Image (tube, grey):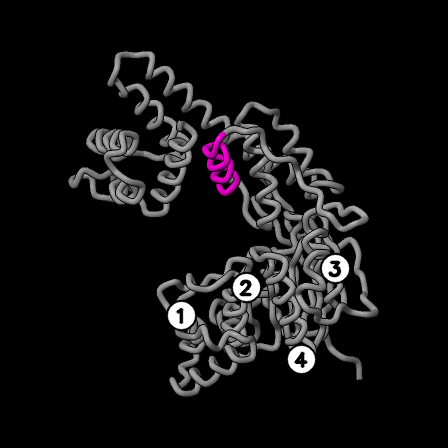
Amino acid sequence: MVEQPLIKTDKLNVVYFLGRPNQVNAVTDVDLEIFPGEFVIFFGPSGCGKSTLLYSIAGLERNIQGDVLVNGKNLAKFNRQELDDHRQHTIGMIFQAYYLISSLSVANNIILPQFSLKTGKKERTKKADELLNFFGVGQQKDKYPNELSGGQQQRIAICRALMNEPDLILADEPTGNLDSKAATDVMNLLTELNEKKGKTIVLVTHSPGSLAYAHRVFHMKDGKIIGVTVNRQRQQPLQSAVLSADVLAKDLGKVSENKTIEVLPPAEPAGILAEIKAREIVAEALTGLSLEELGRIEKIVAKMIGGQSGQVLLDYFDDSGHGLGLDTRLAHKLSGRIKDVLAEIKILQQAEQKSKNQLAGDSTQEIVEIRHYLLEQFDVKLKDSRALLNFDSIIRDRLSGGSGAKETRLLFRQPIMDNGAGLDKRLVKKIAKRLELLILGKI
């Protein structure tokens, strides 16, 4: 009897902004089969569609064309309730960001998926304890997430993913926020789950150092599967110290014969403020990259603040030898996004200088410049002249240090009659974040 695939996709496409000038073909004509008990990896540069493919299998991506079958059932035809059941019973999700609730203890974070199943307290507590002990974090059960290391938090996230006993584990860059030792530990744990517990593992990564753990590797580029590698002899779990140096070196780029890691030279001395600005700008523009990659980009951005050309950043994104080797389209997109933020800061710096050249204490023009920028940037329509005056007052207080960032967010949301701007919560989050970034650029 021929074994049936656990996962099968047929002509799967995911397209955003269909028919528009900015149409994005995130996944294109993907046909694949994954069998029970396999450990497979979707591998490729950031932006190649691997996470979108994973989310399609998870039932999290609904903008799909074609078929996605899991256990013979077609997710493309599921209603909302059937998708909820799929996510609760069939799969366990592990993310790069741990998504632990900081106000809950470790034990309660793990127990959360059980509440939807209405299991008894004794049963779910016993199951949580078993998972914690299996992953070596039993002594942390009464602590809170912010008391744990990154590696420990990811172990807790794995425990939570296993609480409802799914046969299929989907992991999106699970080692992306970890140092090399913790990353190796997590890969070892996933291998153990695959080999000893029989779990099917589907993992997304852009790290070459993880590929040897898989039975098969699906190589992706520009939304397509361009090749499949079969590992005849998989990487067996190793001690962290054995693998960590090589994994870290491969993640960072080219490695010399003596295994030293080639890194970019430090930024030109520009003071701690340049480093802070660079970190904020990169955090604003980029998501989904490893800590090592973000660190290198921050150094380049710090030089750009000092006046260096943005071409070096584009080269780093595009270069497959010493850089990230991103798709050309994505490299230009990310580079352009960072340069746009830098340009915005420059505009505000010029506005500030113009204001300084006026009479001392006259900040009206600067506030108007910032107000115009924020309203246009986020397409905000203030309700009346009172809201406009309040909006200016909120900006003035923040610039002068009369209010903090948290208080400013509250004022933007507060009703107009209470001296607020009466804005929507999600809109306030974007406006307040951009205002803080602009203030940081003005220092």
Residue marked by disc 4: 198
On whether residue 387 falls in the magenta region, the answer is no
Tell me which residue sits at (37%, 38%) in the image.
431
Three-letter amino acid code at disc 2? Answer: Gly
Write down the quadrant of residue 147 in the picture: bottom left
Residue 20 in the image: above or below residue 54: above
Residue 245 position, x and y percent, is 70, 56
Three-letter amino acid code at disc 4? Answer: Gly
Which tag is nearer the camera, tag 3 or tag 2?
2
The label on residue 151 is 2
Residue 171 position, x and y percent, is 60, 64
The label on residue 416 is none
Three-letter amino acid code at disc 3? Answer: Phe
On whether residue 282 falls in the magenta region, the answer is yes
Tell me which residue sits at (50%, 62%) in the image.
149
- Left or right of 192: which side holds 78? left
Residue 223 appears in view: no
Residue marked by disc 1: 143
